[in-house]
Amino acid sequence: MSETSLSYVSKQVLIPTEREKLFDQYKDLIETDHTLNRTLVSFQANKKEPFYRWFKYKEGFSKKLINYFIEKYHPSKGHILDPFAGSGATLFAAREKGWQSTGIELLPIGVFNVQARLAAEKVSLEEFKNEVSSFWNSFYKTSTTDSFIQHISITRGAFPEENEKNLNRYLICCKNIKNNSIRVLMEFAAFSVLEEISYTRKDGQYLRWDSRANRSNGNAEFNKGEIFDFILIVKEKIEEIIEDLSPNQNFDLFAPEETNIVMTDPKILKGSSLEILPNMSSNTFDFVMTSPPYCNRYDYTRTYALELIFLHNNDDDVKKLRQAMLTCTVENREKLNYLENLYKKLNRASDLDFINSIYFSHPAMSEINDVLSKLNELGKLNNSNIPRMVKNYFYEMVFVIFELHRLLKKDGIVVMVNDNVRYGGEEIPVDLILSDFAKIIGFKIKKIWTLPTGKGNSSQQMGTHGRSELRKCVYIWEK
Ligand SMILES: C[S@@+](CC[C@H](N)C(=O)[O-])C[C@H]1O[C@@H](n2cnc3c(N)ncnc32)[C@H](O)[C@@H]1O
């Protein structure tokens, strides 16, 4: 939307005063942390790190980021929670410091990642190497037409025929590996190369299809470059794993940071935080380090569709996972009734009332909901479900924040990474709204750290109504 149409809408609809008021209230807490460059915050910093480089979970935290915030806000060890654990980066980084760690993750992708890492710790390198060489002997002797990979509508045709045949053959041979940890690791090697051997690329919000797949999706011609041969690339992946598991003078993959630290296995709970958090005991955790899905339409179930079918999810499973995600896509339907029933079943109707009262009486939230529905009526949004997505994203986040507050011990800390978003020209200050919810719930808002943008500081940017760069933030809340 152009600046002209934005002011047109603002004049016709609502002047966004509530968001400005909120900004005034928090502006002194918003500060740029120059150590937080994009590389430190995201997976980029892990690209060459042992283990992290095996499977590229692009939404993952870097290990350095987790260490940075633990050291800054809670150097003494305790019990850490990540309710949106993804690849489990928080859990593993924290336990190397001697923390007890618990994660919740909805998608089986992250859960498998955690299991593979734990399996890697259990294998003996010699046994693994021996198994690998006998594996390839049996692989070349196996000819099978069985299909291990069962496609769903959004993945059909994703692999060149030869790659799919060899992938199936490989996975069938994996079934004969007796040692459970070695089998998991061998399967994980194949899991980690699915993108490279396919016609697809995880690209921003989408799974892009190469035009060689003959799967027209209305986009411009796209060529992803080399599509790797499955056998060659999985062998490379196995070599990488062996290299990382080999004794090396620079690092020990699974060693604690200091020799006197006792490491305990992280606990990963598979399912939705919206359902698991309310069932956990109060005052359990010392620290929460997390990054929920952003309110940005990113659909993990589509981007990671190949990995989901690898892990035996059928069409129905994938649709269910998509709906169970914290609302972050235009396809997510409302969970209001579901949450009401859940809280009533747990005899927590008064908590439900409190949560509802926070959400439904929040002036800036109501302003955003009003502006977006008006923009929708005017046809100014590029998808008519955006207002529903935004409304439900924040609604569900109140539940999450409420539960985090209940689960933390006194003085416990939340570190949350999230980005602001903009729809139809309207900025949605996710950082301010979530922090304000947190404050009403009882947290002290210690800081809203922003990533450096290179374009002046955030308060200067917010001063005008023009298009400012959206803040990418790390919020620090204390119980
Ligand atoms: C931004 S990513 C977090 C990545 C993580 N920090 C890491 O280092 O890998 C958000 C994660 O939340 C998960 N997720 C989405 N909805 C969820 C829900 N309702 N309950 C639990 N996890 C969910 C997604 O599958 C995704 O892995």
Image (cartoon, helix red, strand yellow):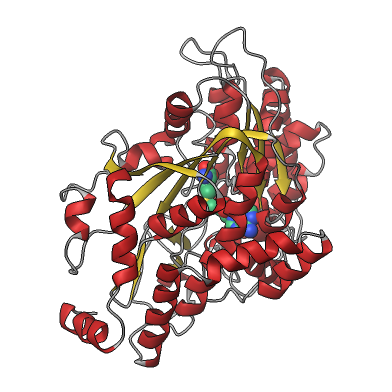
Instruction: Indicate whether 76 appears above or below 356.
Output: above
Residue at 73%, 69% in the rendered image: 340
Residue drawn at point x = 55 percent, y = 39 percent: 479
Residue occupying image coordinates x 44% and y 60%: 201
Left or right: where does residue 3 sit relative to residue 284? left
Q: Position of residue 448 (x, y in %)?
A: 36, 45
Which picture quadrant has residue 471?
bottom left
Q: Quadrant of residue 163?
A: bottom right
Percent of width and height locating residue 132: 68, 31
Farthest residue toward the bottom? 378
On screen, residue 367 versus residue 154, left or right, reads left
Image coordinates for residue 305, horizontal then vertical, percent: 59, 62
Q: Nearer the viewer, residue 76 or 86?
A: 76
Residue 464 relative to residue 346: left or right: left
Q: Nearer the viewer, residue 434 or 318?
A: 434
Compared with residue 425, is residue 247 higher up or lower down, i.e. above or below?
A: above
Furthest residue to the top? 260
Numbered circles on residues, count = 0
Residue 371 picture quarter: bottom left
For the question of whether residue 188 can be seen, the reply is yes
Q: Quadrant of the N terminus?
A: bottom left
In the rendering, at what x and y percent does residue 451 appear?
30, 44
Is any atom of residue 307 visible in this view?
no
* Residue lying at 73% horizontally and 22% vertically, measured from the top left: 127
